Amino acid sequence: MLVATDTASLQRQNNEIERALSYNQLAQYVPYPKQLEFHSAGANPDVRERLLIAGNQLGKTLSASREAAMHATGLYPSWWPGVRFLKPTTGWAASITSQGTRDTVQRMLLGRPGEFGTGSIPKASIIEVKKATHGVADSVETITVRHHPTGGTSRITLKTYDQGRERWQGDTLNWVWFDEEPPEDIHTEGMTRTNATGGIGFMTFTPLLGMSTVVKWFLIDKAQGTHVTTMTIEDALHYTPEQRVNIIAAYPAHERDARARGKPIMGSGLVFPFEDELIAEPPLQIPDHWPRIVGIDLGYGHPFAAVWIAWDRDTDTAHLYDTYRRKEATPITHSAVIRAKGAWIPVAFPHDGENRDGRNSGLTVAQQFRDLGCNMLKVRATHPPAKGQKEGDGGISLEAGLSDMFDRMQTGRLKVAKHLADFFEEKSMYHRKDGLVVKEGDDILSATRIALMMLRFAKVKQAPREAAIPGFKPTVRGVGMLG
């Protein structure tokens, strides 16, 4: 009987401990490395809004709810690497619909109805929960929270996107959390609410809407003041390898990248639907006998891009070993980079390189680069001419160029140094919509296509001769096409 009584007491004690812990989930939060990366970016004063783009059930909403709770309560753990608010805050947390907000944002912050205090906001910190007067059952409108360091109060208002832009106006916020991807006008209006305070925005979603304006804002435009953390199923440490395999297999094939790895669903399909590992390679020590070529894609408002390719003629394999991408810069800046990486390397340029620039004495863009010391080819990039055609008459078909790149990737004849993140980033986003290629965020890829179109004019660096040999006339393949 004594043993039984002691066992019962121990069980009651354990139950009380578990109950106490359930009402202080915030104190138990230990983020995964990717969640920590997301939080850490908030400490950068140059980062105003952050995106945690991730697959389903990987912990993105959990991490954002924990951060929101910290900003409201002021209970930052000692390890916290992110931004800290020293005073009570006013924040908005939102999702698509009233039901969606209740079932995700509200549940993560408060816990389920009847169990408020079991979410990210500790029970001891909740002063008042005001129920919504309209919408779905058990939905909450505002949460008043004790700010422990000051003794003041913070307020969290739960919003929905389907309320429309008008309901997103008026208030001044310290922070706003978008859970699931918002429409462009809601995103703009929400961030506007933080202007006066110098506040922050953070966003968490799985990119099931494809290359939307908001996704493009973060991933393609890389707008000033933004930061993106991508979290895949491999980064979610609560799954075993076997569970990951089973989860991925259960998703429809066209949704697997989005739901498991946070990659946007791309219209009618990716242009290059190959795993990066198929074409990635470690940086090479390039043999001297491999000819090289540079391909450029012109741009000012959108980035100018250049790629450097070394060609193994024996296997007809193009090795892309370096890249450059920059917008709102002049040919003077770009040409300096090109010369620094090998002024002798031929430079292939697209058809608009033959356009004349009235601001520069009517010179073509290609001639400007030529005058700045770049080894420009004499004509624009074209596919190899058919028999009987002269050089420059080979055509500039986009689809033909993409077909060549596709074939080279598929057969292992295009390799890319694995550290060139900008190439793989563009590759992962390059897609078709209604059968047509979406020409956005493709600067590095376009430069690659241009270089491959003119690969036949790649050149080997000529060693300097110590002395002229009477009667000797060297032959340099392709030299007739150099400017």
Image (spheres, rainbow, N blue to C red):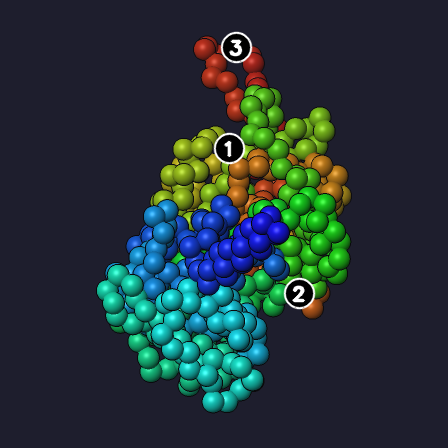
Q: Which residue is mark 1?
A: 345
Distance CA(mark 3)–CA(mark 1):
28 Å
State left or right for residue 353 relative to residue 415. Answer: left
Query: x, y percentage for residue 89?
Result: 31, 69
Residue 250 shows in the view: yes
State left or right for residue 187 relative to residue 421. Answer: left
Which mark is nearer the camera, 1 or 2?
Answer: 2
Q: Residue furthest left?
A: 150
Q: Are marks 3 and 1 in contact (CB under 8 Å)?
A: no
| Secondary structure beneath label 2 | loop
Figure check: 273 above or below 348:
below
Is 288 in front, or is 235? Answer: 235
Closer to the chain start, of discs 1 and 2, is: 2
Q: Are marks 3 and 2 in contact (CB under 8 Å)?
A: no
Which numbered marker is on residue 456? Answer: none
Is 214 in front, or is 377? Answer: 214
Q: Which residue is mark 3?
A: 470
Closer to the chain start, of discs 3 and 1, is: 1
Closer to the chain start, of discs 3 and 2, is: 2
| Secondary structure beneath label 3 | loop
Q: Which residue is mark 2?
A: 267
User: Residue at point 71% right, 37% down?
Assistant: 412
User: Residue at point 31% right, 57% down?
Assistant: 84
Type of amino acid at the residue the image marks with label 3: Pro
Quarter of the view holding residue 58: bottom right
